[in-house]
């Protein structure tokens, strides 16, 4: 596909064609407002794109990690159903942790924990929970860190068994250095008492259906959502320039005045009316001319990102597990999570074959980040062969990808540094920053879509909305309604 010629004075310039940027452009298009989108990659969708792997006549599809869809926003379900129609399907969910050779449901299934650990260890979990409730509830010990939060809500034994080790694996820092916002955002409302109530049937059966049981997923991968948005946008006059990226953003202290874009045809300078950006917020600050104040740049240097390394294996095997994805919290295991795309949709693999997507968490300074494909494959195979998942002979091919700026690190000081940055950015009245990278918030794709829609309304209505309220529901992050399709 040829790169379209960019307008030099777009009314609305969107930097990044991930879920937030595309949702913003889609809503604007529905109201007759075309925009110009600039995307560094060749394919739209950001971290929610679906990759196509061709091996002769066989085609394997994979997301970049598991991208199930759930939301409390009916508008989002309708938004996607209008794009995908019969491709938008409900999928049963099975998510487990693999610890010491045994499976544990995620979120925690207390009856299963008792069965696997035995009565003595289970009693210790109960005792630790009571002591934690006394310490943090009755004695009012403050929740200053993620460690405080999970110990207060699950007790020390269960927190260390199920959450602390995996969280430290994700972030690469001790849980005593992780901000409690991480827990409040992801597991608020979930605790050992709620788990126990469900186990003995006191949780109630009314109300919204938990997405522990099922979720929606496109037939040919989550990237189909963004392919269809892109197709619609191009058909209705929105320009999408791929393999293009901003290299300089000029401003006068109140407005962004010009943006230099590197495109396949060279550097193009545009003068946008509005700018919606989902570039990693720390990288965006480096593009600004003149630079932000020293205090803002110093704050940006204190924000850290966790990168990911992905190993994708195509297999001569019918199926490895029945799980959508599996967590591996033990720190001696080098990878953190796996996905089997066939268990999301049979159409993600050829008949009689399957695939396995393996995720590693890393800093770009880690040795893992510098490893080649064969080195990473050699790192993982002993584990999978030991567990009986698959053998080296069953591996058809291996593919390695690396992505920086995947997870914003919620350390105990991030909020102060982020506030310094956002307070200054708010002075640029024609700038709206959205998405996980743009706002330094670890949210799922439904929240990024919601941010994009809110950004479009800010433009259409000429008013501001509080973007930080998106995804801040005060209950367990993966609990919400499964809306039925419209008839």
Image (cartoon, rainbow, N blue to C red):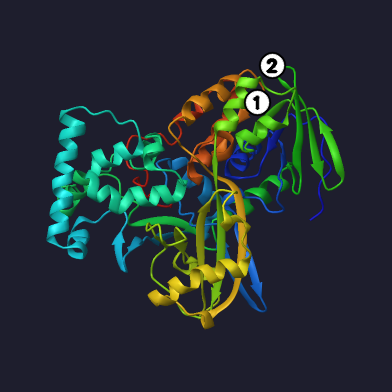
Image quarter of residue 348: bottom right
What is the distance, in whole Å, between disc 1 and disc 2 at their CAs?
A: 10 Å
Label 2 element class: loop
Please state which of residues 460 and 22 is positioned toward the viewer in this rendering. 22
Quadrant that contains the N terminus: bottom right
Q: Residue at x 68, y 45 (%)?
A: 233
Q: Residue at x 69, y 32 (%)?
A: 286
Please state which of residues 115 and 364 is positioned toward the viewer in this rendering. 364
Callout 1 touching callout 2 (CB < 8 Å): no
- Residue 38, given in percent of the width and then of the height, sits at 72, 41
Please state which of residues 36 and 128 is positioned toward the viewer in this rendering. 128
Label 1 element class: strand
Question: In the image, is residue 3 above or below residue 185?
Answer: below
Mark 2 surroundings within 10 Å by alpha-carbon count, few (fewer than 14), some (14 through 19), many (20 or more): few
Q: Which residue is mark 2?
A: 254
Marker disc for residue 431: 1
Question: In the image, is residue 357 above or below residue 187?
Answer: below
Looking at marks 1 and 2 on the same chain, the residue that comes earlier in the sequence is marked by 2
Question: In the image, is residue 111 above or below residue 380?
Answer: above
Q: Residue at x 43, y 37 (%)?
A: 471
Image quarter of residue 279: top right
Image quarter of residue 180: top left
Q: Say whether residue 459 is visible.
A: no
Relative to 368, is 476 on the left or the right? left
Marker disc for residue 115: none
Total marks shown come to 2
- Residue 52, given in percent of the width and then of the height, sits at 63, 65
């Amino acid at each position: 596909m040829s790169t379209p010629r960019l307008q030099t004075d777009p009314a609305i310039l969107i930097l990044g064609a991930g879920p937030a940027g595309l949702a913003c452009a889609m809503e604007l298009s529905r109201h007759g407002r075309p925009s110009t989108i600039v995307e560094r990659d060749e394919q739209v969708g950001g971290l929610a794109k679906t990759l196509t792997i061709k091996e002769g006549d066989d085609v394997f599809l994979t997301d970049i990690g598991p991208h199930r869809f759930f939301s409390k926003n009916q508008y989002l379900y309708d938004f996607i159903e209008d794009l995908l129609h019969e491709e938008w399907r409900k999928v049963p969910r099975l998510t487990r942790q693999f610890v010491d050779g045994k499976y544990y449901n995620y979120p925690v299934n207390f009856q299963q924990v008792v069965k696997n650990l035995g009565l003595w260890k289970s009693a210790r979990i109960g005792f630790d929970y009571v002591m934690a409730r006394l310490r943090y509830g009755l004695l009012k010990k403050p929740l200053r860190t993620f460690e405080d939060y999970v110990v207060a809500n699950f007790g020390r034994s269960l927190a260390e068994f199920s959450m602390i080790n995996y969280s430290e694996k994700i972030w690469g820092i001790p849980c005593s250095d992780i901000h409690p916002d991480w827990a409040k955002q992801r597991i608020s409302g979930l605790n050992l008492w709620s788990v126990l109530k469900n186990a003995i049937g006191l949780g109630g059966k009314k109300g919204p259906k938990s997405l522990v049981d099922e979720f929606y997923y496109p037939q040919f991968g989550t990237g189909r959502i963004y392919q269809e948005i892109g197709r619609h946008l191009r058909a209705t006059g929105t320009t999408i320039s791929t393999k293009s990226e901003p290299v300089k953003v000029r401003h006068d202290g109140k407005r962004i005045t010009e943006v230099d874009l590197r495109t396949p045809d060279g550097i193009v300078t545009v003068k946008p009316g509005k700018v919606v950006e989902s570039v990693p917020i720390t990288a965006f600050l480096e593009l600004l001319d003149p630079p932000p104040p020293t205090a803002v740049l110093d704050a940006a240097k204190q924000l850290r990102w966790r990168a990911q390394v992905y190993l994708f294996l195509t297999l001569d095997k019918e199926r490895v597990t029945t799980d959508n994805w599996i967590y591996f919290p033990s720190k001696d295991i080098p990878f953190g999570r796996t996905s089997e795309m066939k268990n999301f949709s049979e159409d993600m693999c050829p008949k009689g074959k399957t695939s396995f997507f393996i995720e590693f968490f890393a800093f770009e300074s880690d040795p893992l980040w510098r490893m080649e494909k064969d080195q990473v494959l050699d790192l993982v195979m002993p584990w999978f062969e030991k567990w009986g998942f698959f053998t080296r002979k069953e591996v058809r091919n291996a593919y390695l990808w690396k992505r920086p700026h995947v997870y914003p690190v919620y350390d105990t000081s991030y909020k102060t540094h982020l506030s310094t940055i956002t307070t200054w950015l708010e002075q640029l009245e024609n700038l709206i920053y959205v998405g996980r990278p743009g706002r330094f918030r670890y949210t799922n794709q439904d929240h990024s879509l919601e941010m994009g829609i809110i950004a479009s309304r800010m433009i259409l209505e000429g008013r501001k909305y509080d973007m930080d309220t998106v995804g801040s529901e005060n209950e367990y992050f993966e609990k919400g309604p499964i809306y039925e399709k419209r008839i």
